[in-house]
């Protein structure tokens, strides 16, 4: 999250209209998190509370045994005219492909 | 659904600690010799829960403790990180244990779930409060859908 905040101007400078963050949490939690991270006006904080979007993407992650239920894998994508142009799915536990820095390189 | 006189079902809850989430089993929480007030709600940071339910227990903390209650616990189908952040936001401090039932294991075992999938919230817990002595449910105050009366700190106090 801080990576996308720090790079928001550079990303927008590449002609990106919207930067969105999606998580299997409800809208109340995403709103509170956005407030804490000061994303207002920069990143859309979207709740996928029932995992509907994540399931449709085919990118869920079962953390039931960790007390986190069914969540989303970590990934980033670049979408143009509704079409996925780039999809960066992280390996389990990794944080490289989906970073703001890596996304920037592909814009 | 569990009823008065039942033992609290076995499940593992989680709570944020200095080193991240740690497991809290219902056997530890509702141990023999302990009197516990536990209240459950549909979600952290949601309007009724944030504005009324948790603040009531924080405000009435001293009175509840004076009735011989060892522990006050708040349980929600959110993860330990969310419950930890919410506890901070609510200044629940060391008054109310903020317990996460992120996979709804406990809520399912209690038979007190609520399907909010269509509202984009997945399966959550119904709103209720209970008084547990020696691991046995002494009072179970389950709210009607949308209501906030039976499980309030004020009403729990009347039953202690």
Image: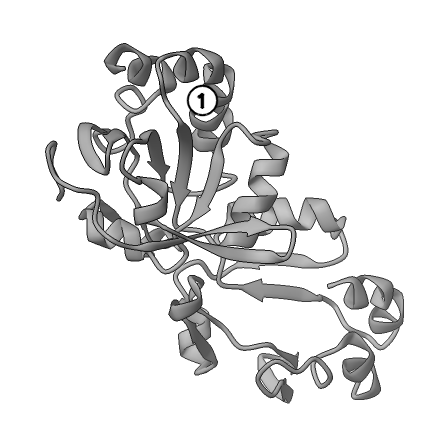
Identified at 37% across, 19% down, the residue is: B153
Residue B15 sits above or below residue A43 on the image? above
Task: Assign the C terminus of chain A to one quadrant of the image.
Answer: bottom right
Q: In the image, what residue occupies the spot 19% across and 33% down?
A: B137
Q: Quadrant of residue B84?
A: top right
Residue A80 horizontal/vertical position (percent): 66, 81
Image coordinates of residue A86 in percent, x first then y, are 66, 89
In which quadrant is the N terminus of chain A drawn? bottom right
Query: Residue B119 at what x, y percent from top left?
Result: 36, 51
Disc 1, SS: helix
Query: Residue placed at 73% from the left, 84% from the top?
Result: A96
Left or right: A102, with B22 as reference point = right
In which image quadrant can residue A92 be found?
bottom right
Image height check: is B148 above or below B18? above
- State whether residue B81 is above or below residue A84: above
CA neighbours of label 1 inside 10 A, class few (<14), some (14 to 19), many (20+): many
The answer to whether A17 is drawn above or below residue B142 in the figure is below
Give the letter of the chain under mark 1: B
- Pinpoint residue A57: horizontal percent, then vertical percent: 46, 80
| Pointer 1 residue | B57
Q: Residue at x 67, y 50 (%)?
A: A34
Task: Say whether residue B127 is visible.
Answer: yes
The answer to whether any part of residue B115 appears in the image is: no
């Amino acid at each position: 999250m801080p990576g996308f905040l720090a790079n928001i101007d550079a990303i927008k400078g590449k002609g990106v209209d919207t930067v969105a963050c999606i998580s299997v949490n409800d809208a109340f939690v995403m709103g509170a998190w956005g407030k804490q991270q000061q994303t207002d006006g920069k990143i859309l904080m979207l709740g996928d509370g029932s995992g509907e979007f994540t399931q449709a993407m085919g990118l869920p992650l079962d953390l039931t045994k960790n007390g986190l239920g069914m969540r989303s894998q970590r990934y980033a994508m670049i979408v143009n005219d509704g079409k996925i142009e780039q999809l960066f799915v992280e390996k389990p536990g990794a944080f490289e492909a989906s970073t703001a820095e890596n996304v920037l390189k592909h814009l | 659904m569990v009823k008065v006189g039942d033992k609290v079902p076995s499940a593992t809850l989680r709570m944020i600690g200095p080193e991240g989430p740690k497991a809290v089993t219902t056997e530890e929480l509702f141990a023999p010799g302990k009197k516990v007030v536990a209240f459950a709600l549909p979600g952290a940071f949601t309007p009724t829960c944030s504005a009324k339910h948790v603040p009531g227990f924080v405000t009435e903390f001293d009175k509840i403790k004076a009735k011989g209650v060892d522990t006050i616990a708040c349980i929600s189908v959110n993860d330990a990180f969310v419950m930890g952040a919410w506890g901070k936001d609510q200044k629940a401090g060391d008054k109310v244990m903020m317990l996460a039932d992120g996979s709804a294991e406990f809520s399912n075992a209690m038979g007190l779930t609520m399907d909010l999938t269509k509202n984009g919230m997945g399966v959550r817990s119904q709103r209720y409060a209970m008084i547990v002595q020696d691991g046995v449910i002494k009072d179970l105050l389950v709210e009607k859908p949308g209501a906030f009366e039976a499980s309030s700190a004020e009403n729990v106090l009347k039953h202690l």
